[in-house]
Image: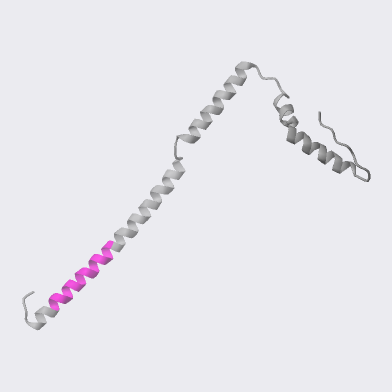
Amino acid sequence: MVEVKVHENESIDSAVRRFRKKCEREGIFSDIRRNQYHDKPSVRKKKKALAAKKRRARRRGFTLLELLIVLAMIGAMFLIMVNLGRDSLERSKEKMEQRIIEKTKQGGDP
C-alpha cells in the first residue's frame, strides 16, 4: 500500500506527483495495465507466439533496403577503383612512351 503524507505548506499537486512516482516505482501502474483486460490462455499463447516470431524476424538478417545500400556503396567504390586504375595505367603508358622517344632521340634501341 502506497502512502504519501502531505506536509504543511505543500501543495496538493506536489503530493500527487510524489504519489504517482511511488506508484510507478512499486509497479502498481504496470500491474493495473496488465490486469485491465482478461485474456484467455489461448489468446495469450497466440500473442506470445506472434511476439517470438517478430523477434526471430528482427534477428534473422539485413533488410532489403540495407542490402541495396551496401551494394550501391560497393558499386561506387568499384567505379572509383576502376577509374583510378585506368588513370594510373594511362600515366604509366605515357611515361613508357616518353622513355622510348627519349631513347630513340639518343640513338639507342628501344
**Residue 101 location in percent, x, y?**
13, 78
Majority secondary structure of magenta residues: helix
Determine the residue located farthest toward the right in the rendered image.
8
Colour mapping: one colour
The quarter in which the N terminus is drawn is top right
**Residue 84 location in percent, x, y?**
30, 63
Residue 24, image quadrant = top right
Compared to residue 47, the image places residue 90 above or below, namely: below
The quarter in which the C terminus is drawn is bottom left
Compared to residue 102, the image places residue 62 above or below, namely: above
Tell me what residue is drawn at x 84 percent, y 39 percent.
16
Q: Is residue 47 magenta?
A: no
Left/right of residue 41 with respect to residue 84 in the rendered view: right
**Residue 40 location in percent, x, y?**
65, 16
**Residue 58 location in percent, x, y?**
50, 35
Left/right of residue 77 with respect to residue 34 in the rendered view: left
Q: Nearer the viewer, residue 40 or 18?
A: 18
Tell me what residue is drawn at x 62 percent, y 16 percent.
41
Residue 50, image quadrant = top right
Extent of the magenta region: 85-101
Tell me what residue is drawn at x 72 percent, y 24 percent.
35
Residue 22, image quadrant = top right
Q: Is residue 89 magenta?
A: yes
